Amino acid sequence: MTRVAEIFESMDWGPAPEGRGEADAWLDGHGRAFGHYIGGKRQSPGATFATLNPADGTELAQVTQGSEADVAAAVKAARKAQAGWAAAPDHARAEVLYAIARGLQKHSRLFAVLETLDSGKPIRESRDIDVALAARHFYHHAGHAALRGETHPGAEPWGVCGQIVPWNFPLLMLAWKIAPALAMGNAVVLKPAEWTPLTALLFADVCEMAGVPPGVVNIVTGDGATGAALVAAEIDKLAFTGSTEVGRILRRETAGRAMGLTLELGGKSPYVVFEDADIDGAVEGVVDAIWFNGGQVCCAGSRLLVQEGVAEAFERKLLARMAKVRVGDPLDKAVDMGALVHTEQKARIEAMLARTGGTIHRGTAPEGCFLPPVLVTDVHSADPLMQEEVFGPVIAMTTFRTPAEAMMLANDTTYGLAASVWSQDIDVALDTAPRIDAGIVWVNGTNMMDAAAPFGGMKESGFGREGGMAGLASYLRPASGAALKPVKRHVAKGDGPGGIDRTAKMYVGGKQARPDGGYSRTVAGPKGIVGEVGVANRKDLRNAVEAARGAASWSRTTGHLRAQILYYLAENLAARGAEFDARLVAQGATDAAEDAARHLFRWAAWADKHDGRTLGVPIGGLALALNRPVGVIGAFASEARPLTAMAQVIGAALATGNRLVLVAPETAPLSATDLYQVLDTSDVPGGVVNILTGEHAVLAPQMAGHLGVDAVWSFSDAGISDVIERESAADLKRTWVNDGRARDWQATDAAPFLAAATEVQTVWVPFGV
């Protein structure tokens, strides 16, 4: 007689297949051939391609390849429906989203089986995670829809949103995008992934049953060409989840179009295990971190960093656990890993494994589109498996000695999507987690997600957030002013001021600096020449950026300290108000130092008020949304109200813990160079504010392309918005540009500054039993 203890020791298991009859019946009911869903109607199939079951290679259905005309029809239907949907009472929209959530629950088994057939993921993951979380997103955002008038009074939706979702979580990514868009009053055109379109097409049935007005949700299937057509269409906002490579292309394609853009891209997430961790728990966490969904997860913990003292024991335990991971038929409820999504994906992963210099340890897997769990040891930090996204069941392991070295290794990547920290010492865990450059960090856990918790990346893992209050902002149109009016530019005449020539220098690293190129230009006002300033070149920009990066300790100071320095800065500016006012008049600028000082004082007040949030997620523990500074901000100053505008930019950047490289207004640069005298007497550390004088159009592509700059703001009238957005694609830095629109610099609208100056980092801290 077999004892229960022996079963747990051997992990023997019998098959527990999930039936696929209901899914096959649904496919048969549509003749296994699908057209698009446009304007509330299923279209007749056009030119089609096959979608396959990756577990056995059999064809599931034929799906239409979307054309430019199909996309245009979907966008037209969405445009026609959107105004009415946005104008509907908040309660009416909430009822529809609630009905969608109920529809997903009522048909959860059908969705789960169909998702597994189409993607190859295990049925228990589809059933217990994907479908359940998709329903949770619609429930959660039904609440946001009901409260829109209270939480976002006067806010307007973007309009028509194009949405492109990946193949690893087809239904869940659909919910992440459609739910907030609809809640805020947008209409959508969604393109599911070419390899996994079926649950999106099934979702159309739920929309009809839930009473979604025709045209509010449109689904167009196809490959990358269809996605490109959607990007090029007359949409107002684009949301994309996929590879970083494609994300760069989309950033360039959308540059200068004054449209919304959120990108959720690749990751290379560190999984950090300290010596005092619960080792058995951390080993089990690895299973969830990298072998969940076959490692085809953007936030997968694919870099295992283990402290030296426990590394040998950890590796031994992990190899033993890896040998027990069961790979097989994804419809078997007892399987841990199913099939990879496509044979192309399997070939890509095998090719990456062939490039590593590490030692490869493999589990077991059946023949076909399957891969076993893989652990690679003896890898150095530059190994391809430590730097490049694999998107498969492969984890690379290395060691560290100290917490400082752990942080260095964890942040040694161009990505910044997620991380996991394991330690039983709460001081170690909570000191480490916020210092990792990642949009989401789990403490003693992994892969915790919820609709209330913002999800998104830093660095080259994309920008924008999905989920929670932060995610809603992506589906609301920011306020926009009137078209910029050209500022009068005075022509130099006369000999200028007499006496000793004083060419204003630039301000870099807390010191006055001559221009590298040796060039200067005159500054003219209504009565002639009032002075000269240097002309910055790319080397001056490089020096300023290096100085700003060297002042990183400013980002770690307390809000209280930053507030005191900004108060002091405002006080010192006000004391010299008459001098600054005279300089403004001489340059022909309309502004007042009193207004600039008032805004600096206001931003000092904000320095310790931009709080994070404690999120209402369904776990035992806490999930925290923390506001982290972006880092080094490059900013192009406004010509309108130049001193007040610079005070707003300096105040917002410094209050939130950022460092600044400010390019002075071209028409009133002397008001910027005068500021460094105030900075010197206000305890602003060297490198926190750097001031350059030069042509905006010349410096814009250099600033946007500089890898040491984390974000670029432009309030310039030089028409550089498109250049900044296009050049920023190199490292996917954050941008905030004016698109030729004016700003009211007297206004006290902190929200857009705070949003541009910080990134939300979600830290999950589970505790209790």
Image (cartoon, rainbow, N blue to C red):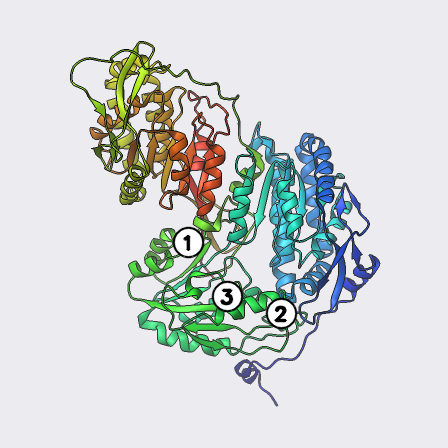
Q: Is residue 558 left or right of residue 442?
A: left
Q: Is residue 674 left or right of residue 590?
A: left
Pair 3/1: label in front: 1
Amino acid on which disc 1 is placed: Thr
Q: Position of residue 712 (x, y in %)?
A: 41, 37
Amino acid on which disc 3 is placed: Ile
* Element assignment for label 1: loop
Residue located beneath label 3 in the image:
290
Q: Position of residue 370 (x, y in %)?
A: 60, 72
Extreme-top residue of the structure: 527
- Sequence-wise, the earlier of marks 3 and 1 is 3
In the rendered image, the vertical position of residue 536 relative to residue 411, given as above or below: above
Pair 2/3: label in front: 2
Residue 414 — which label? 1
* Element assignment for label 3: helix
Let me know if residue 342 appears in the view. Answer: yes
- Sequence-wise, the earlier of marks 2 and 3 is 3
* Element assignment for label 2: loop
Q: Is residue 531 left or right of residue 645?
A: left
Callout 3 crowding tier (Cα within 10 Å): few <14, some 14–19, many ≥20: many
Q: Quadrant of residue 609?
A: top left
Q: Position of residue 473 (x, y in %)?
A: 54, 38
